[in-house]
Image (tube, rainbow, N blue to C red):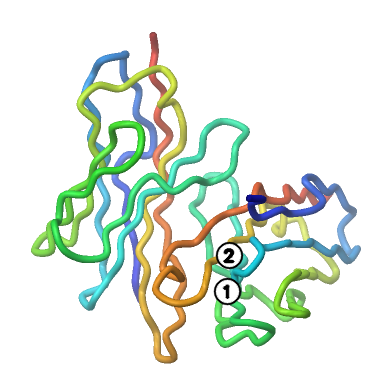
Amino acid sequence: AQSVSQHNHHVILSEAASLELGCNYSYGGTVNLFWYVQYPGQHLQLLLKYFSGDPLVKGIKGFEAEFIKSKFSFNLRKPSVQWSDTAEYFCAVRTVFSGGYNKLIFGAGTRLAVHP
Amino acid sequence: GAGVSQSPSNKVTEKGKDVELRCDPISGHTALYWYRQSLGQGLEFLIYFQGNSAPDKSGLPSDRFSAERTGGSVSTLTIQRTQQEDSAVYLCASSPPGRAQETQYFGPGTRLLVL
């Protein structure tokens, strides 16, 4: 079965520190990859996505992620975090089943706390 | 435009009671998904609708869970004889037709607490 692993469950950083959140998936076929963010008291929002092409994708708020096919990874990065980045981050993989429909398989999430 | 909406936002119920959770997808979105987010866990897929039909019900945890969608729009997730382990946040997402279906847009969720 497909699975998504997020290695860090809790991350604490000071403002201006660099961030990298790990994400690995197990599916060997064609995948679409996503990072979603959930700010305190808010609903899930799409941060960035990878479907094809340039493996380095840029999202909102200065986030980027790199798809490394050989490592089955899609790590999220930000060079300098801000207090407002405090949130929970979810990596997700989309797999395509016959008939063209799909579902997202999510990792367990990483809680990021940024201290001023 | 308006996003995905869900109601109620919070629901407290007693063990053994039935509950209904509602999802209003974004207008024009043909696909609708239900997920469950339990404490300390990631999001777990429950069911997927394309129009009014549900080609994938593989995530429903037991036969106490059912869902329907009418008019290609509103969906209702019903949990019968609720158990304490059903306590979670139930999230609904929708996506537009075609290639754009690859991106799902999430609602705020319904927080269910079973006492």
Label 2–label 1 contact, CB within 8 A: yes
Which residue is denoted by mark 1 in the rendering? Answer: B31
Indicate which disc, 2 or 1, sits on the residue closer to the N terminus. 1
At a point 43% along the width and 34% down the height, the residue shown is A111
Extreme residue in the top direction: A116
Residue B107, percent from left and from top: 63, 52
Q: Is residue B75 above or below residue A37?
A: below
Residue sitting nearer the eye, A86 or B5:
B5
Helix, strand or loop for disc 1: strand
Host chain of mark 1 = B
Host chain of mark 2 = B
User: Mark 2 belongs to which amino acid?
Assistant: Ser
Q: Is residue A64 above or below residue B30?
A: above
Marks 2 and 1 sit apart, C-alpha to C-alpha, by 5 Å
Which circle marks residue B94 in the picture?
2
Q: Quadrant of residue A5?
A: bottom left
At a point 86% along the width and 58% down the height, the residue shown is B15
